[in-house]
């Protein structure tokens, strides 16, 4: 996107519009400055990723009224520029006495709180921090009224920050490009349009990870080469004593920094994998070195051999049961990068810089692809869970039938209700679950909280454990209740791929349906909306005797009379309710 000219972006955006399908993703932008053409640039960037984005710019300097008008959008972006906070701001601000300044701050503190309240139900709010850099050229003055106002209003933002809100620091973009390349003083004074096309393109690039996360497009797996990627040098040729792996050398210091960043990603729930053409024993020797921060146990999958990397990455995807579009591949070889780009275009590929000093900057950009709205317990335990899954696979080989194996596991499902489920995890499940997901609705924490607070909705999640360990919170159902028509409508039914193949979904839905059998409700409706990844559940409702009432190529609608439901008889999964 950065490399395209504005005219090329406008043309591409028009072309993409005709090819979009699926539900619209509506974004509103409210501001006190002129922001065109950010709407076309953002639409184009999202449509390139198959998100049917429609961006609407609010009226000039109408933040208070526009926040009301945009309260039903999927996302809202807020540009509230300090330099245009009031008329002739740059002149009048430094002439204010302390009383006038405090009145100004109190006024806008109230307005910020008002806007936050109006946008509290919007799934995603991207709010730019107030900054004092535009129209400021004095590098040694840090006690001006302008800076005081900026600091105070940003403190209000942080103090009243809501779960649906991501704060964007524009200063980082100013620093990266230089203020003269992102701020257009002439256009600002002529039409209150402060930013250049370069700024808009980079700003859009910076906020995409948050929008991707809200649309279930966050990356999940980081695949790493070894030589000149995890350490400096070639272990098979240079030997353990000659490669750069620790802070005792300048090059080793850089790789040590990368190791810490990799471990940070692991703690956030990113799965790590190695795909390296090497002798396993040589690589193992490096990991056993006391100066090496990473350990073999930090990785969910290892492919250390002399096979084609395309074959190995496909194998990793199969082992982890994760789609290739969730993969990021990092290697120092242009040959390997080009091969993967051509053979597996879904994989995002990055090359280690020739100048190793640029490596930290590359990695800082790369890790944004794994953006999430907060780590959960399941994220921090992800690698441990994959190790336990490996034990389960070995155990399964001992049994003659799948049913005997499942019975041997001692499976237990704990049903969680509105009081006991974990809101961040429930939101994360909707954002990341693709395979066993009947409707693939994406929800933020704010939307999950709204379901919980709304008596028209019924929401349950579940925990799973067996004799090998805990899977964590791995399933979710959201049902809309139509009291007037005595009908239930399943809005969301999903389950993490980690527990697929254990018949857990059958026992879960069985338990849920039985909760309603003696209720005033007579029917329960379900639907299947086809995506590129959920074909395996296209006949799920048939398997539990729902009647298909309507279908087409991409959608199926179902109905079940609750009095006709046949409950599961054979119980090999224990079910526990945790409702307090």
Image: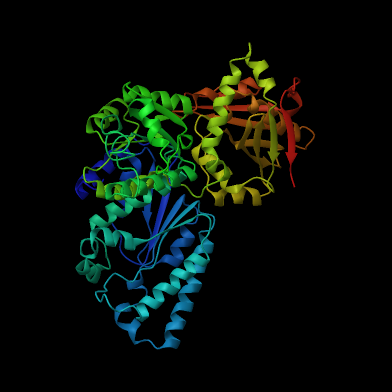
- The foreground one among 230 and 207 is 230
Residue 473 falls left or right of residue 345? right
Q: Is residue 127 above or below residue 573?
A: below
Q: Residue furthest right?
A: 518
- The foreground one among 391 and 421 is 391
Quadrant the N terminus occupies: top left
Q: Position of residue 257 (x, y in %)?
A: 36, 49
Q: Position of residue 7 (x, y in %)?
A: 20, 48
Q: Is residue 119 above or below residue 148?
A: above
Residue 551 falls left or right of residue 247? right
Q: Position of residue 378 (x, y in %)?
A: 56, 41
Residue 410 falls left or right of residue 166? right
- The foreground one among 113 and 309 is 309
Residue 475 falls left or right of residue 417? left
Q: Residue furthest top?
A: 400
Quadrant of residue 335 in the image?
Answer: top left
């Amino acid at each position: 996107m950065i490399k395209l000219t504005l005219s090329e972006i406008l043309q591409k955006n028009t072309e993409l519009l005709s090819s979009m399908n699926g539900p619209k993703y509506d974004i509103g932008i409210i501001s006190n400055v002129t922001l065109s053409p950010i709407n076309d640039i953002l639409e184009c960037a999202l449509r390139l990723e198959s998100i049917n984005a429609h961006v609407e710019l609010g009226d000039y300097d109408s933040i208070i009224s526009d926040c009301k008008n945009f309260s039903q959008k999927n996302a809202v972006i807020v540009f509230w520029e300090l330099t245009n906070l009031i008329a002739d701001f740059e002149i009048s601000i430094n002439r204010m006495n302390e009383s006038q300044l405090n009145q100004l701050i109190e006024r806008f503190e109230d307005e910020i709180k008002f806007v936050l309240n109006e946008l509290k139900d919007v799934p995603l709010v991207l709010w730019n921090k107030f900054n004092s850099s535009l129209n400021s050229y004095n590098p040694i003055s840090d006690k001006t009224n302008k800076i005081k106002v900026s600091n105070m209003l940003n403190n209000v933002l942080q103090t009243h920050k809501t779960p649906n809100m991501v704060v964007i620091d524009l200063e980082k973009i100013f620093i990266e490009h230089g203020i003269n390349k992102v701020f257009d003083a002439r256009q600002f004074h002529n039409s209150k349009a402060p930013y250049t096309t370069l700024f808009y393109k980079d700003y859009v690039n910076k906020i995409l990870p948050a929008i991707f996360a809200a649309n279930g497009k966050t990356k999940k797996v980081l695949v790493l080469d070894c030589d000149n990627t995890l350490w400096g040098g070639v272990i098979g040729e240079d030997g353990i004593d000659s490669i750069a792996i620790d802070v005792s050398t300048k090059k080793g210091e850089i790789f040590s920094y990368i190791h810490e960043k990799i471990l940070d990603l692991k703690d956030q729930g990113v799965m790590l994998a190695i795909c390296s053409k090497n002798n396993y024993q040589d690589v193992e020797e490096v990991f056993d070195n006391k100066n090496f921060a990473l350990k073999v146990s930090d990785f969910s999958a290892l492919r250390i051999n002399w096979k084609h990397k395309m074959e190995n990455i496909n194998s990793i995807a199969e082992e982890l049961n994760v789609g290739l579009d969730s993969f990021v591949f990092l290697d120092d070889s242009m040959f390997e990068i080009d091969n993967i780009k051509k053979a597996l275009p879904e994989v995002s590929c990055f090359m280690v810089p020739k100048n190793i000093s640029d490596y930290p900057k590359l990695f800082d950009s790369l890790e944004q692809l794994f953006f999430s709205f907060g780590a959960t317990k399941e994220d921090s335990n992800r690698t441990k869970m994959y190790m336990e899954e490996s034990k389960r696979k070995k155990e399964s080989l001992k049994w003659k039938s799948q049913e005997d194996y499942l019975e041997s596991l001692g499976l237990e499902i704990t049903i969680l209700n509105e009081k006991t489920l974990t809101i961040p995890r429930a939101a994360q499940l909707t954002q990341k679950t693709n395979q066993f997901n009947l409707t693939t609705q994406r929800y933020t924490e704010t939307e999950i909280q709204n379901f919980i607070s709304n008596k028209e909705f019924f929401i349950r999640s579940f925990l799973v454990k067996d004799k090998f360990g805990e899977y964590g919170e791995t399933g979710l159902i959201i049902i809309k209740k139509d009291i007037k028509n005595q009908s239930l409508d399943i809005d969301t039914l999903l389950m993490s791929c980690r527990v697929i193949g254990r018949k857990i979904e059958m026992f879960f839905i069985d338990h849920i349906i039985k909760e309603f059998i003696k209720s005033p409700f007579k029917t329960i409706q379900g639907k299947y909306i086809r995506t590129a990844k959920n074909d395996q559940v296209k006949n799920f409702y048939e398997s539990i005797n729902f009647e298909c009432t309507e279908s087409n190529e991409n959608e199926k609608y179902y109905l079940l009379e609750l009095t006709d439901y046949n409950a599961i008889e054979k119980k090999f999964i224990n079910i526990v309710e945790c409702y307090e």
